[in-house]
Image (cartoon, rainbow, N blue to C red):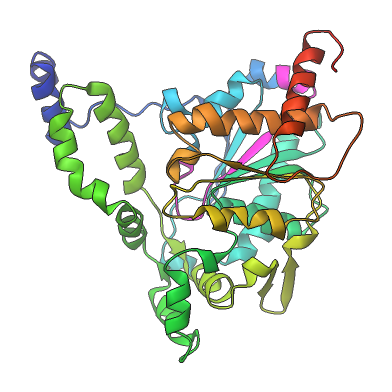
Amino acid sequence: MTFVIDRLPTPVRNLMRLTVGGGIRDEVHTPHTTLHSERHRVLRRYGDLDQLARAREQGGIPVLLLPPLAAPAACYDLEPDHSYVGHLLEQDRIPYVIDYGEMDRSDRALGFEGFIDDIIPQAITRVLADFDGSAAAVDLVAWSLGGTVALLTLAADPGLPVRSITAIGTPLNYGLVPPYPLVRQLAGKTGPRPVTATLSALRGIPAPLVQIAYRGTAWQRELKKPWFIMNNLGNTETLARMEVVNRFQRRFPGYPGRLSEQMWEQFIYHDELAGGVVNFGDRRIDLTTIAVPVQLFGSHRDVIVPWAAARHGVELLAQSPQVHFTTVETSHLGLIAGPDAESQTWPRIDAFHAALDYPPLVSGPGDQDSTDSISAATSSAASRSAGTSGP
């Protein structure tokens, strides 16, 4: 069958592969090693042992990538040409990815506490152990709700060995995310209990509902997809990129029960995240006390996390020694994967980390919505690596 399809003209061949041939291309991922394989905490290291040894010798800082709670960890390695883990390896950084895997009804009791008190701290400890003690801390990089988890984790335990946090397209004010203000207003007369009870009965938000909701944010694109395919049957590369995104969307896991209830009550109904203090039962977690450098990204074209909801972190995290915010005009997924991420997001993260590797001789206040200090530090890092003195 494959032999026959391969001999057809390109448009016909692509149509056959999309319908009955198993796809335009096989999936290809960056080589990695699974260090630990346990439920909701699979830890992978990317790169080979020679790269790891070189990073250790150079005193590098490992990068731990946190995916969102309802999106596949593959967001950091969608395809070889647009792989963030591959980019980090090219920068002589060793990336690690924690994979939460599937969520089902048996995860009814899993809430934010399970991630911020157990899963993420354990991953940090395991990463540093794998780095053989040559690094004192990790840099956390997280996309979407993963950024919220990263911030909550460090706020819950400021003593964790974390050097910095990068949160990409992370909602930090749900009052600025449609349609939540309207939902909160409609629920004003009854309180949060009816919605909480529904989520409790469902034992979370099932994966199919999450997948439908994600596709619904780009409903115009979904409606136009048949015409897009027909107009691009002769363009194999374009169809291959579309296929990568489609595969990614089909694998969205669900939200565990307790966590979905906490998101509704603490983040949406009571709007606690926007104020910086989140209450999980009798426990109070204050994000305004975070004392490590933070980098944030947002986009006006992001229909899932509006620019203002991501930009809110600049005021929220004002006590941090540095808070950098960068606007990259692209989609929500485009902030971390794809051409816009490759040309804009990834270099900015590189510069942020380089500035921490080679801090300026004179430190100033945290710069907000500014790139000057990062750019200067990047130039300084380049000068030092070339054996010359910086400015």
**Closest to the observer, 75 or 2:** 75
Q: Is residue 6 above or below residue 105?
A: above
Question: For residue 71: magenta?
Answer: yes
Name which quarter of the figure residue 312 lies in.
bottom right
Residue 33 appears anywhere in the view:
no
Q: Which residues are magenta?
A: 54-74
Numbered disc total: 0
Q: Residue at x 49, y 69 (%)?
A: 260
In the image, 382: left or right of 28? right
In percent of width and height, residue 302 lies at: 44, 49
Name which quarter of the figure residue 345 lies in.
top right
In the image, 191: left or right of 131? left
**Closest to the observer, 370 or 251:** 370
Q: Is residue 23 above or below residue 380?
A: below
Q: Is residue 31 above or below residue 209?
A: above
**Closest to the observer, 339 or 21:** 339
Q: Is residue 40 above or below residue 235?
A: below
